[in-house]
Amino acid sequence: MLWRRARKAIIVAALALFWLLSAGWLTAPLLAAVQGDAAHYLPPKFGPRTVIVMLGAGTRHDSQGRLVPMPDVFPRIATTASMYAQCKQANRHCEVIVSGGNPERYEASEADTYAPYLLEAHVARDDLVLENESLTTYENAKYVARILRNEHYDSLMLVTSAYHMPRALLDFHRFGLAPQPVAAPGRVVRCGLLPRRPNLSAANVALHELIGLAQFHVYRALGWF
């Protein structure tokens, strides 16, 4: 309405942007910018006392009304359970901290919702610690640092999705923690001619992470983080 002469150009540009994202051609480099480092992470090393931190990624209600993890959480659970099993096989003392509060204000926190899945994946209840207050990645790091303040550990691992790892590491470093990154499988883009809904979802994730990375550096420069 304000720019009548530019209306056609704006519509064409918007349609082109939508196609580039939904067909994957623009989504692919955006996603690579946030999860490309995962291919270069070194294999984790287990110390005599190892702590594995898994970050949450939301919950939802399924078709039967049950509160369940979001789809991206299941690779994190599988990766955490695998690291825990390897730790136990190496005869180490192993602890798993699940960090995730209740930002959606559902009937249970992320950590409490994920716990049964980890127990089913053979993580011992005595080795499972639930941090169910954090609402953001920054608070994940803050509250996990608080838990670890009075604990002795030799090896610290951080499990989250590949696309989330760069931002998560920044937040954990902010609180003096230097975990070994263990990336769960991230998003995959399929490029082609036709629009694909998963590509739009991946674009949303990539943009969210890129904005979060920029926000972290701006807040640090302002002294807010």
Image: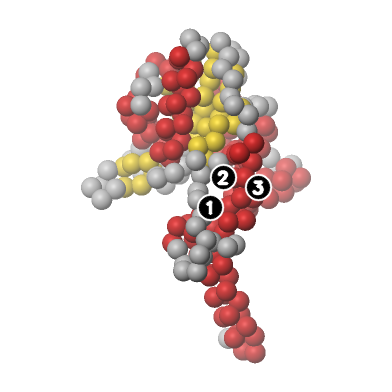
Foreground of the two, 48 or 55 = 48
Residue at figure coordinates x 36%, y 35% from the top left: 113
Which image quadrant is residue 154 in? Answer: top right
Foreground of the two, 138 or 97 = 97
Numbered tag placed on residue 205 in the rendering:
1
Residue at figure coordinates x 31%, y 47% from the top left: 61
Q: Earlier in the sequence, mark 3 or mark 1?
A: 1
Foreground of the two, 128 or 193 = 193
Q: Tag 2, which secondary structure?
A: loop
Disc 2 marks which residue? Answer: 163
Q: Position of residue 126 (x, y in %)?
A: 39, 15
Mark 2 → mark 3, Cα distance in angstroms: 11 Å
Density class for disc 1 (Cα within 10 Å; few <14, some 14-19, many ≥20) is some
Q: Tag 3, which secondary structure?
A: helix
Q: Earlier in the sequence, mark 2 or mark 3?
A: 2
Mark 2 → mark 1, Cα distance in angstroms: 8 Å
Density class for disc 3 (Cα within 10 Å; few <14, some 14-19, many ≥20) is some
